[in-house]
Image: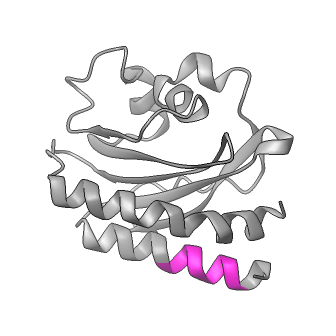
Amino acid sequence: MDKQTAQALLTATVEAVGRHLNADRCFLYVRQPSQQHGRIAFQWRRATTIPDVIQPDWQPDTIDLPQEDPLFRAALTLQPSVYVPDVETAGPDVLNRDFEHNTFGHRALIHAHVQADGQLWGILQPCLFGQARTWTADERAYVEKQLPGLLAPIRAFVGE
């Protein structure tokens, strides 16, 4: 798969997931595991009033970020995806509330991990603003079903 095809597929998938879950925003953080860095490269927003979190530049992600963000630490250590119904009531073992407020601003989120070969390749993150949300078993199954299909296009997009 070439990079252009991968980009089109990832763009379409991020939008489809966001719309399917009736989310306010859905983004995909992609990684180059060999370089230990990543960036938010794809995003769909229900409205332009929802904050834009695209990161045009690669960011190192194995030094400070895992210490600051328990959700990212869970992804990096190959833990299962995390479904957060309410940022305001989640414990510090799940997330860093200040980090979530300052960086993303969402209220409910899914932190879905794209993992293979002992590596984290990406994080798919649908979310809602202004309200909590319990993620149903069907929604969880839908998200988990999407993750394996993201691996090949992520690898093609990041060039690994």
Pick the residue in front: 82 or 117. Answer: 117
Residue 106 percent location from the top left of the image? 33, 43
Q: Residue at x 22, y 59 (%)?
A: 139
Q: Is residue 136 above or below residue 88?
A: below
Q: Is residue 20 above or below residue 31?
A: below
Residue 118 falls in image quadrant: top right
**Is 77 contained in the magenta span?**
no
Residue 6 percent location from the top left of the image? 68, 78
Q: Is residue 88 left or right of residue 111?
A: left
Say which quadrant the C terminus sits in.
bottom right
Q: Is residue 119 left or right of residue 75?
A: right
Q: Is residue 76 left or right of residue 86?
A: right
Residue 87 percent location from the top left of the image? 27, 31
**Residue 39 in view, yes or no:** yes
Pick the residue in front: 153 or 30. Answer: 153
Q: Residue at x 46, y 69 (%)?
A: 14
Say which quadrant the N terminus sits in.
bottom right
**Residue 49 in view, yes or no:** no
Q: From which residue to which does the magenta span run?
A: 5-12
Q: Residue at x 49, y 36 (%)?
A: 103
